[in-house]
Amino acid sequence: MFTPFKTATLNHHASTPLFDGSVTQTLNRADFDNAEKEISNWDGYAETPLLDLPGLAGRLDIGDLRYKHEGPRFGLGSFKALGGAYAVLRTVQRELSKSIGKQADPADIRHGLYAEQTKAITVISATDGNHGRSVAWGAAQFHTHCRIYIHAEVSEHRADAMRKLGAEVISVDGDYDATVAQTRADAEKHGWLIVSDTSWPGYTQPPLDVMSGYGVMAREIVQSYATPPTHVFLQGGVGGLAAAVTAVFHQKWGLDAPRVVIVEPELAPCLFASAKANKATNVEISKETIMAGLSCGEPSELAWSVLTDAAHDFVTIPDSIVGPMVRLLANGVGGDASVEAGESGVAGLSAVVAAANQLTLRRNLHLDANSRIVVIGSEGITDPSIYAQIIAGEI
């Protein structure tokens, strides 16, 4: 059952958190409050399940293992539904407020009271799939035009899902970072508004909005715990998800917050490289990982300021354990319920299973029978054809 995880090569870098305040100041409580108040009023909002996996925990000889299943989120298949769409609303709200000379009410925007004005606004974004789908959905909800930029490795199913939401989808040569560069060039040329989940010098507000939206998910988690878990394993990417969860956990539990372990594909380890260099560091992606949503070579500087303040460990995982992890979840372990998860969604859990089965890493991450671990199942089935291939053992 665990053979691929026992033999997999994981790289580990232990970091010393600074705890200088960035973890609670970069993303503040008021921004999370505003996002929670708004998103909880959207049609279709429902708390996603925090699944207990006692069968798998027992086989790994850890005390407790819970999986936040984001597949059902707003029918969009991933946690990204919270961030991109909320950032679209905030971007539209700021632009509209300037044109009408007063603060536009988000509820009025949602209900179409300013539809004629918002139709003249174009929001654009780069994506590997899930963020773009959320931006496209948000643009439809808030009555604005949308252009999404994708690279060649984004599947046709994911591209078509965005088209069906009304977005214009543009293919760009190169990887994810090339699509980000193209959005920046086109935004400057045409006056379009970028809604990105990554920040760069001079561009911070929409990424902050995105991460504030992710905080809704993190707050759902903390409400389920009477005492904090000991560990949280968080997918990397540009760092937005990890930063938001880490910030909410520290706002709730302070220094009693769980040990933060950042997990990335070995093919796209920009946060791992940043931790080793002790500064935000880009990496070149020479081959795309199966974990498409995590194929990012350039970290968000805002997210990095949070992670360098509070993350304890950075781990990279090989693609070889992703398919086995998806299949283990689908089959259930030791009586656990079957869970349908996407490739990026199992990154954190894959690292848990591999680390628990390798003595050195188990010791370095302080995993034992008393460990209580939470992971983020960040996506469900976002491409049925890829999922079918994984279940069939073809990937």
Image (tube, rainbow, N blue to C red):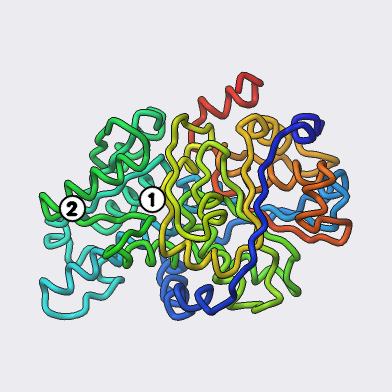
Q: Position of residue 139 (x, y in %)?
A: 28, 53
Residue 317 placement: quadrant? top right
Amino acid type shown at disc 2: Thr
Residue pictured at 35% horizontal, 28% vertical:
152
Q: Position of residue 384 (x, y in %)?
A: 51, 29
Q: Position of residue 385 (x, y in %)?
A: 51, 25
Counting residues from the N terminus, which is met first, the one under dot 1 or under dot 2?
2
Quadrant where the C terminus is found in the figure? top right
Q: On the image, numbered disc 1 is attached to which residue?
A: 134
Residue pictured at 37% horizontal, 66% vertical:
209
Amino acid type shown at disc 1: Ser
Residue pictured at 57% horizontal, 45% vertical:
264
Depth check: give the residue in front, 162 or 285.
Answer: 285
Q: Is residue 121 left or right of residue 325?
A: left
Residue pictured at 41% horizontal, 49% vertical:
298
Q: Is residue 139 left or right of residue 60?
A: left
Quadrant where the N terminus is found in the figure? top right
What SS does tag 1 mark? helix
Q: On the image, numbered disc 2 is attached to which residue?
A: 122
Q: Is residue 172 left or right of residue 66?
A: left
In the rendered image of this protein, does residue 263 appear above or below residue 22? above
